[in-house]
Image (cartoon, rainbow, N blue to C red):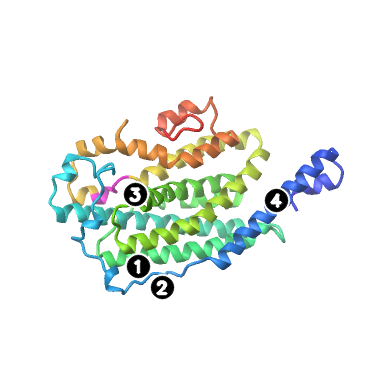
């Protein structure tokens, strides 16, 4: 039972308000229990549910299914399209491998943060069980991503910024869980968006990429649902100073997370000598890449509008970061 529910039962709130708080409390508990149950009846194992050794799932660097589609930011450039087929497929595969590498690095801090958060929960909190299910699922995802990268045989160097903020994120998980769960959404929502777009694009995907993406999308839907409901419940209770910090930091975190998952890493750029002008064309202001970032952030941005983390006063800040869109609009 939350502090609000306790206060309502002790008569500090008017009767109508008491009933509303108890209802909201029950609905939240039921939702978290339902998500926990789903984790029991529908979950995946990295080494049972992916047929790694099936010859049809083998990775060939020259496989044209790894080529970037022409609706992709880099894939749409004449530079990319004029590369030999073997280079096009290798760049595509190298980018998927780097995203998988970034994915497991993000999941590493996410798991540690969830454990820190769960450690401080009061007895009987419904979030405890759910957070442990989520940690277990993220560990399976990281095993999948790591096995995939190993099987590509390609070296991956994650962007230098990754890992630098880990101590800060863990501090948020302990002392400012609202900000931590916005960090979670900033990492999970754009990946989810990209994977869903890829799966519904209808282009012939490599079966390994398709299998891993389907497993990930299924389980991430629960993680995202939990973070959203937690934030809806907790953010309205925050005071002015914490709301200010939440508004400032959430926008920055979203910008960094969505950018990391949408463009080639510095290592990939150097490996294939991708010219600066091509990167500007693909990812600069007004580009296909910039529009992708805004669209990938649609759901968490809408939640920010709903909870007042983004409002008209803060809109110019989001605009300067290049991630703003009016409420209800993708870009
Ligand atoms: Fe994951
Ligand atoms: Fe997740």
Circle 3 is placed at which residue position?
201
Circle 2 Cα neighbour tier, 10 Å, few/some/many (<14 / 14–19 / ≥20)? few
Please name which of the two marks, 3 or 4, marks the residue nearer to the observer: 3
Q: Is mark 3 within 8 Å of ligand 1?
A: no
Q: Residue 60: give x, y in percent of width and height.
A: 21, 64
| Sequence-first tag of 2 and 4 | 4
Q: Which mark is residue 147?
A: 1
Please name which of the two marks, 1 or 3, marks the residue nearer to the observer: 3
CB within 8 Å, label 2 to label 1? yes
Q: Secondary structure at mark 1?
A: helix
CB within 8 Å, label 3 to label 4? no
| Sequence-first tag of 3 and 4 | 4
Disc 1 versus disc 3: distance between alpha carbons?
A: 25 Å
Q: Which mark is residue 27?
A: 4
Q: Is mark 4 within 8 Å of ligand 2?
A: no
Q: Residue at position x 48%, y 37% from top? A: 251
Task: Give the quarter of the figure containing the C terminus.
Answer: top left
Circle 2 is placed at which residue position?
47
Please name which of the two marks, 2 or 3, marks the residue nearer to the observer: 3
Q: Taking the image as drawn, is residue 176 in sight?
A: no
| Sequence-first tag of 1 and 3 | 1
| Sequence-first tag of 2 and 3 | 2
Q: Residue at position x 30%, y 67% from top? A: 150
Q: Which mark is residue 36?
A: none
Disc 2 versus disc 3: distance between alpha carbons?
A: 27 Å
């Amino acid at each position: 039972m939350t502090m609000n529910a306790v206060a309502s039962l002790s008569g500090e709130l008017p009767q109508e308000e008491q009933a509303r708080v108890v209802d909201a409390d029950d609905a939240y508990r039921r939702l978290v229990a339902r998500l926990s149950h789903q984790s029991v009846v529908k979950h995946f194992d990295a080494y049972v549910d992916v047929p790694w050794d099936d010859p049809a799932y083998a990775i060939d660097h020259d496989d044209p299914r790894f080529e970037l589609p022409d609706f992709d930011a880099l894939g749409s450039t004449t530079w990319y399209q004029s590369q030999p087929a073997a280079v096009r497929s290798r760049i595509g595969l190298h980018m998927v491998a780097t995203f998988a590498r970034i994915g497991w690095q993000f999941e590493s801090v996410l798991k540690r943060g969830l454990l820190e958060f769960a450690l401080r929960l009061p007895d009987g909190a419904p979030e405890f069980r759910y957070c442990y299910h989520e940690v277990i699922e993220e560990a399976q995802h990281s095993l999948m991503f790591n096995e995939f990268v190993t099987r590509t045989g390609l070296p991956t160097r994650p962007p230098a910024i990754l890992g630098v903020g880990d101590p800060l994120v863990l501090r948020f998980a302990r002392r400012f869980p609202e900000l931590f769960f916005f960090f979670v959404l900033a990492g999970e929502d754009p990946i989810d968006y990209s994977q869903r777009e890829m799966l519904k694009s209808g282009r012939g995907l490599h079966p390994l990429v398709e299998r891993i993406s389907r497993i990930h999308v299924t389980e991430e839907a629960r993680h995202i649902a939990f973070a959203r409901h937690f934030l809806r419940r907790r953010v309205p209770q925050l005071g002015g100073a914490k709301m200010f910090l939440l508004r400032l930091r959430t926008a920055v975190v979203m910008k960094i997370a969505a950018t990391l998952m949408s463009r080639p890493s510095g290592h990939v750029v150097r490996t294939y000598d991708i010219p600066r002008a091509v990167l500007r064309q693909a990812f600069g202001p007004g580009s296909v890449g910039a529009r992708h970032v805004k669209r990938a952030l649609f759901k968490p941005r809408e939640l920010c509008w709903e909870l007042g983390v983004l409002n008209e006063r803060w809109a110019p800040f989001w605009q300067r970061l290049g991630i703003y869109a009016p409420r209800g609009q993708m870009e």
